[in-house]
Structure formats: C-alpha cells, structure tokens
Amino acid sequence: MQAMKYICSLIVVEDVAKSRHLYESVLKQKVAADFGENIAFEGGFALHERDHYKALIGGRPIVPGSNAFELYFEDDDLEALDGELRAAGFEFVHDLEEQPWRQKVLRFYDYDRNIVEVGERLEHTAYRLSLEGLLLEDISRITYLPVEKVKTAIAEYAGT
C-alpha cells in the first residue's frame, strides 16, 4: 500500500484569469496544469474559481480575507516587487520590513484577500548581514542558519 501523498494547497478566487495574471506574470510562477476553473502551479499551489468550488462543497459559504492562510514566495529584489505591486494598487498587510531574524519580507492581499508573503532568501539575508560586517556565528544565531550554510550562502552571493 502506498503512503498518502501531499499534492498542493488550493486557494479560491473570484476571477481565475485575473488571479492567474498576478501569480504567473507578477510573481513569476509557472503553470503546471490549466483545467479552466482550476489552475495548478509548479510551486505546489492551485487557484480554483469560487462559484465552481462552492458547488463542489455543497454551497457552503466561502469567507475571503480571514488572515488565517498565506502563500509564501522568495525573491531577492523585493524593492522592485514592492514598487510593481504598489503601482498595480494592491493593498499591503504591511510595508517591506525586516523580521526578527532580519529577513526582509512584504505581505499583501491578492485580489481575493488571500495573504501573499514574499521574502528574500535566507541565504541572501546571511550575505547582506555579512556585508554589514557581522561575524559568521552572529549571522547564524540571528538567521538560525547553520554556520556552514552561512558560509555557503556568502560564497554564493559573492560569486566565489
């Protein structure tokens, strides 16, 4: 007997085409399968059109904007993304900020008030902290990355 396998998270959206544009064009996700009212992305999440999904769950209510779920992405050029999202009129949960472990992140609501978080890779955080002159052990303590991973991250971003 084969073990149960996790496939993906699914978020319900009002307009699949509009949401597809956000996730595919702005957040650079690749579509793995397009079933019309349901689109799966390679990253392990899917969009499902609200009316179709509501019928599948027996007409039960769908309450957007509960702040109980988010999709998380990583990108090292958060300043550019921040500008693009603001220009498009998205509502932000909070501005670009550093988390207690010094990783830069921003959170915004998609068209259906699902929270989307985009953070810099922790490896980029480690590199950025090294440029600030922090010692490897201090970077490891702050980011929770092992010292060896900090060394690898710094070398990766320094191009060595």
Image (cartoon, rainbow, N blue to C red):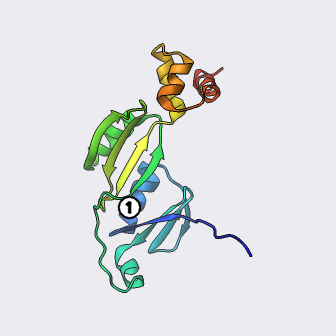
Q: Extreme right residue here?
A: 1
Q: Nearer the viewer, residue 7 or 111?
A: 7
| Quadrant, the N terminus | bottom right
Give the image quarter of residue 16.
bottom left
Residue 108, given in percent of the width and then of the height, sits at: 31, 49
| Quadrant, the C terminus | top right
Q: Extreme top residue here?
A: 133
Residue 111, given in percent of the width and then of the height, sits at: 30, 59
Q: Return the residue at label 1.
A: 19
What residue do we see at 47% from left, 74% from top? 36
Q: Extreme bottom residue here?
A: 58
Q: Is residue 136 above or below residue 80?
A: above
What residue do we see at 38% from left, 61% from top? 19
* Count of numbered tags: 1
Q: Is residue 106 left or right of residue 145?
A: left
Dot 1: element: helix
Q: Amino acid at mark 1?
A: Ser
Residue 116, given in percent of the width and then of the height, sits at: 38, 51
Q: Is residue 118 left or right of residue 135?
A: left
Q: Is residue 80 left or right of residue 122?
A: left
Give the image quarter of residue 81.
top left
Q: Nearer the viewer, residue 151 or 142?
A: 142
What residue do we see at 52% from left, 32% from top? 144
Q: Is residue 35 above or below residue 32?
A: below
Q: Is residue 79 above or below residue 57?
A: above
Q: Is residue 3 left or right of residue 103?
A: right
Residue 34, given in percent of the width and then of the height, sits at: 52, 69
| Label 1: how many Cα within 10 Å (few below 14, some 14–19, many 20+) | many
